[in-house]
Image (cartoon, rainbow, N blue to C red):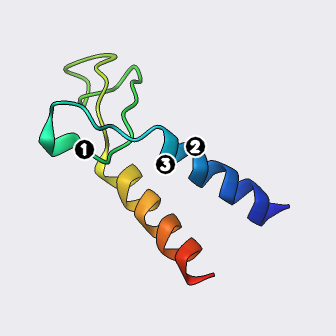
Amino acid sequence: KYLDAARHALQWCIANQYFGSDHDGRGGLPASTPASGVVYRHYCEMSCLYAVAFFALAIQEELKR
């Protein structure tokens, strides 16, 4: 059940990647929170490096299987 949940989450990440006009953000997972932009741009949609790193690690583990 955990593998199934992890694969479902990975599929969601793949389906929600950013491929807009900002070349630096492509491939990331945009999101907004009250503290987006390190508290100076509240609710600004952006992609965080640690989220992209976890996403990359999840893809790497799936490819190993």
Q: Which residue is mark 3?
A: 14
Badge 2, how many Cα within 10 Å: few under 14, some, many 20+?
few
Question: Considering the image in quadrants, where does the C terminus appear?
Answer: bottom right
Which element carries disc 2, helix, strand or loop? helix
Q: Residue 29's quadrant in the figure?
A: top left
Which residue lies at the image location 52% right of the left edge and 65% below the top edge? 58
Residue at disc 1, secondary structure: loop
Say which of 51 and 38 sits in front.
Answer: 51
- Name the residue at 29% across, 51% down: 49
The one nearer the camera, 29 or 39, is: 29
Q: CA distance from mark 3 to mark 1?
A: 12 Å
Amino acid type, residue under disc 3 in the picture: Ile
Q: Earlier in the sequence, mark 3 or mark 1?
A: 3
Residue drawn at (40%, 30%) of the image? 31
* Image position of 37 (left or right of 11): left
- The percent coordinates of residue 36 (x first, y second) are 31, 27
Secondary structure beneath label 3? helix
Mark 2 vs 3: CB contact within 8 A:
yes
Residue 30 place in picture, x, y as percent: 36, 34
Where is 26 relative to 33, above or below? below
Residue that label 2 marks: 12
In this view, which residue lies farthest toward the top? Answer: 42
CA separation, marks 1 and 2? 16 Å
Is residue 17 shown above or below 32?
below
- In space, the residues marked 2 and 3 are separated at their CA atoms by 5 Å
Amino acid type, mark 2? Trp
- Tell me the tag on residue 26: 1
